[in-house]
Image (cartoon, helix red, strand yellow):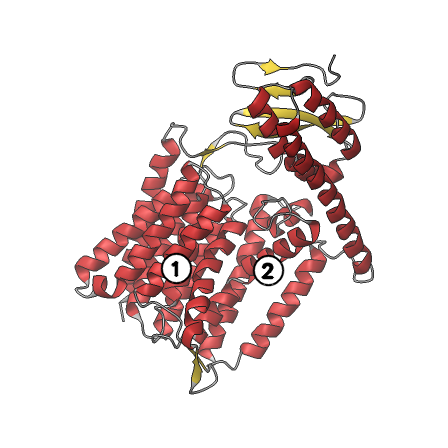
Amino acid sequence: MWSTTTLILQFLGALILSAFVTYLLVGHRGQIGKDAPDEHRKQHAVPISRLGGVAVFISLAFGFFVLAIRLPNFINAWYPIIIANTLMFSIGFLDDLRPMGAKVKLIGQIGCALVLYSMGVSIDILSNPFGSGGLHLGWWSLPVTLLWLIAIPNIINLIDGMDGLATGFGMFLCLTLAFVGHFAQKPDVVLVAMVMGGALSGFLIFNFPPAKIFLGDGGAYLIGFFVASVSLMSNNKGSIIASLLVILVALGIPILDTTFAIIRRAIRGMPIFRADAEHIHHRLITLGYSKAQALGAMYAVCLVLSLAGLSIMFTRGLAIPIVAALAFLLALATARYLGYIRTWRDLRHQVNSTLDRRRQREYVRAHSTLLEMEVEHCQDAATFAALLQTSLNRLGLSATPGPDLTPLRLRCIPSGIVTLYRSADEALREEWQFRGELLEPALSAALDRWQTLPGLQLELPDAPIKGSLNPA
């Protein structure tokens, strides 16, 4: 095993390099990869770079380079991890430069996982954590390995909605991986995990609230895929159930947040990968926590769960029932405290209310689909504008300002914003935002065909265009 001094030097070296590269990225004044604020989820005051994953990747790559020089057999053992992680980072980085869409990214992630699997990094045997023996997966090895390698990057990406959150969680996970590698007598895993932990620590200096730079998809995917892939190297090939359980428990908060998000969006009729402002950190801020306090609370829970996960290895599986009970109680307490479930007695009413909201959204989606079709059938913009006015009235929206109405700004074409008007009730802001976005494809198609619509307020880079929705 490596000396403590060696591990500290590796950690500090990665930290310093990451902090230096991040500093250069923060000072870069170009507009490539900037994340612009909006009036909904992104509340930062000025555009902020989302290319922070570059600093983490460069630091990790340099760490691999140093280890390859110091350890003669390092490349032979770790080249699958290096290649696959590079590919996964590239997918996220390209998306940061120019959004590619969820389906394209998912195909790329599956490709990365297949590349790693084809090079021999897989889950073949789920060992018995309580003793000898294990379950041979056979042909199930492929889907189980792919699920593991794809799920964790997306879980990390889904929680990357608050300054320092995904970066801090990634740091805790890497330190947990280092302990797992030490316990499993895998010194290379310890070194690699410490390098990544240092890289994330250096980046966190600039990512802590208020963030000067964001991870972006490149950084979030790299963190998740690194944890998923290196965990497969942290035990004897195929016999890794203990390592997987440790990581699963340490990922308790991200997994819980993702589970809540999937259930919430599925019930409400929203796309699963659509971002919203109802994650755990959003709820904590709503309850009165500052960003730093919310971050500190989630860090503390992550630390406790990491220790709970490690206890599975220390006790050779005996702690599994206790850890499972802890995770279950945490899920119940979180759902109740954060208001996902206001009262157990009122749960049925909440479900019915949510299902009713889903039906309303389906109604809006049907109008949007019909309007998209009408773009092809209408002979001129005025005819379409009349149909649009009818739909807006039925949906409770307006194209013109009025009493008790507030603007609803929709990005419908590149660099163009359409302004509609909605109820001023801020309690329904998220709902109106989603309904408005459902109309974006129809509005974009109409504007693409006619460039303007009577009565629709359209802001272009040069000048706003306005007219009347009552065609003469």
| Rendered residue at 59%/56% (across/down) | 257
Q: Amino acid at mark 2?
A: Leu
Examine the rendered structure and indicate whether residue 46 appears above or below residue 460: below
Residue extending farthest bottom: 132
| Rendered residue at 56%/59% (across/down) | 253
x and y percent of residue 358 in the render?
73, 48
**Label 1: which residue?**
113
Q: Does residue 166 appear in this view?
A: yes
**Of the numbered discs in the image, which one, if any, rests on residue 256?**
2
Q: Is residue 401 left or right of residue 54?
A: right
Q: Amino acid at mark 1?
A: Ala
Nearer to the camera, 170 or 121: 121
Quarter that holds the C terminus: top right
How crowded pointer 2 is (Cα within 10 Å; few <14, some 14-19, many 20+) is rated as some
N-term-proximal mark, 2 vs 1 = 1
Looking at the rendered structure, the secondary structure element under dot 1 is helix
Examine the rendered structure and indicate whether residue 167 appears above or below residue 364: below
